[in-house]
Amino acid sequence: QVQLVESGGGLVQAGGSLRLSCAASGRTFSTAAMGWFRQAPGKEREFVAAISWNGGSTYYADSVKGRFTISRDNAKNTVYLQMNSLKPEDTAVYYCAARLGPISTMRVNYNYWGQGTQVTVSS
């Protein structure tokens, strides 16, 4: 069992930065692939970034590539999403997810989800 709690969301102006954190409980964190997804009002939840259990592989959505960076600290049971050069279209609720398997970009492959943290980017 893995429980996930996101933090770090907030209101930021376009061009600004935020760092999201996802704290995980459970001994399986260090072997779990982790992902960040987001959901804007009226839209489906979409993939943002993913990282393998040891941080050796990362994937990004084209819309965030070059601006967002996913990382993890297994000693702290935490995964991060550094978001730079934020745009109004990045506004969404951001969710952390854990997968007890290989890294994946597909929402259906993730077993555990956090409650989400709101990110709002003003123009």
Image (cartoon, rainbow, N blue to C red):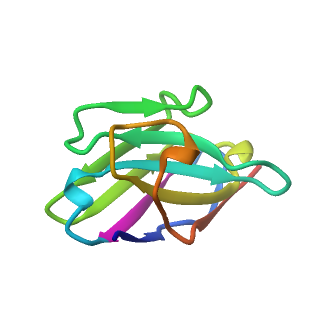
Identify which residue, 68 or 60, lies in the foreground.
Answer: 60
Q: Which quadrant of the structure image shows residue 77?
A: bottom left
Identify which residue, 16 or 90, lies in the foreground.
Answer: 90
Q: Position of residue 74 (x, y in %)?
A: 18, 57
Q: Position of residue 99 (x, y in %)?
A: 39, 51
Outermost left residue: 75
Q: Does residue 85 appear to the left or right of 71 in the view shown?
A: right
Q: Does residue 5 appear to the left or right of 33 in the view shown?
A: right
Q: Does residue 8 appear to the left or right of 71 in the view shown?
A: right
Q: Position of residue 94 (x, y in %)?
A: 58, 58
Q: Is residue 70 above or below residue 29?
A: above
Q: Residue at x 57, y 49 (%)?
A: 37
Q: Does residue 17 appear to the left or right of 75 in the view shown?
A: right
Q: Which residues are magenta?
A: 17-24
Q: Residue at x 22, y 51 (%)?
A: 31
Q: Residue at x 29, y 62 (%)?
A: 78
Q: Position of residue 5 (x, y in %)?
A: 43, 73
